[in-house]
Amino acid sequence: MVSKKNMSGNKKILMLFSIIFCSIVFSQEYSITYNYTFKKDSTNIQFVENEMMRLDINRKGSVFYSYPKFRYDSISIEKNKKRENILEADKSKISFFVEKEYPNFNMFYHLSLGRTNYSISDTTKINWQLENDQNTIKGFNVQKATTNFGGRKWIAWYTKDIPIFDGPFKFNGLPGLIVEIEDTKSDHKFEFLAIEKNSTGYSNFYIVNKLKEIKVDRDGFKKAWKEYKKDPAKDMKFTLLNSKLGFKVNYDGKDYSVSDMIRNAEEIERTKIKTNNNFLELSLYQ
């Protein structure tokens, strides 16, 4: 029988080995591409959307973001430098991105409510149940794990063939890269597509999208969410009423009153709230 003292010592050795191993692996920079399939409206689950997402990692941490958003922002930065017009439209469907710090995996969830940007600090540790089920995905040997996270039950498949203890969104902490993860209602799913060495990083996207953020914890964001639902056009009201534009605004050759624009903004935001209700992390909006 192994004593508790020996078990404790073994855990410390394993943890030290993991930290050293991580530092070696993460000294390289990698980009991992996932396909994200999601149903944003719980009242219309037949409508399924998808977005190509990337997980960029280096020795300090990782960031998970929309690739179309990254591409559009990168083009915009270059065009602005050259003072050229931006002809390409932003076709991204996902605006959030998730930052993780190694080796403790402290997280920062970056998203917007209306015109206000938030950075939500999160130290939540994901508790995994390792299962015996094994499979093969994209040529990798994978093993099953399950967890309850964010108000959903999740089934993940991870591979020790890629010794990166990270994954899409906030998911991390398994003994290998998360290749696939889906909630039990099939509302949100991330599927591995490719991995490659990355020398360019995510600096431009990362810096631009962290500008003018309000830093909050989970409770602070929940409070902001409740206030946003009560008055979703508050930011627009403040901008228009302090813009010195007068009582009318000319847009696209037509005159609109400030009150009309505020009312229109309220309708748009309330429609977003009504149809974008099937959040990936449900517990953050309760």
Image (cartoon, grey):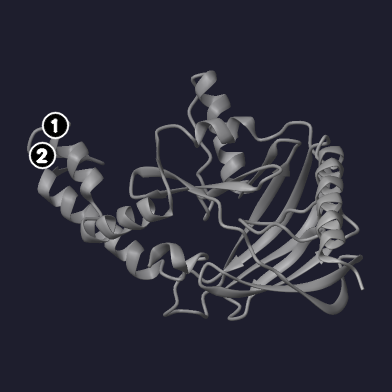
> What is the quadrant of the C terminus in the image?
bottom left
Mark 1: which secondary structure?
A: loop
**Residue 268 at least partly seen:** no
Residue 74 position in % (x across, y down): 59, 33
Say left or right for 203 vs 32: left
**Mark 2 touching mark 1, by CB under 8 A?**
yes
**Residue carrying label 1:** 245
Residue 172 position in % (x across, y down): 69, 57
**Residue carrying label 2:** 248
Say left or right for 39 vs 249: right
Total numbered badges shown on the rendered structure: 2
Q: Quadrant of residue 160?
A: bottom right
Towards the viewer: 165 or 240: 165
Mark 2: which secondary structure?
A: strand
Amino acid type at image mark 1 = Leu
The 10 Å Cα crowd at callout 2, few under 14, some 14 to 19, many 20 or more, is some
Q: Quadrant of residue 25?
A: top right
- The Cα atoms of the two marked residues, 2 and 1, are separated by 7 Å
The 10 Å Cα crowd at callout 1, few under 14, some 14 to 19, many 20 or more, is few
Say left or right for 18 vs 44: right
Amino acid type at image mark 2 = Lys
Q: Is residue 147 above or below residue 237?
A: below
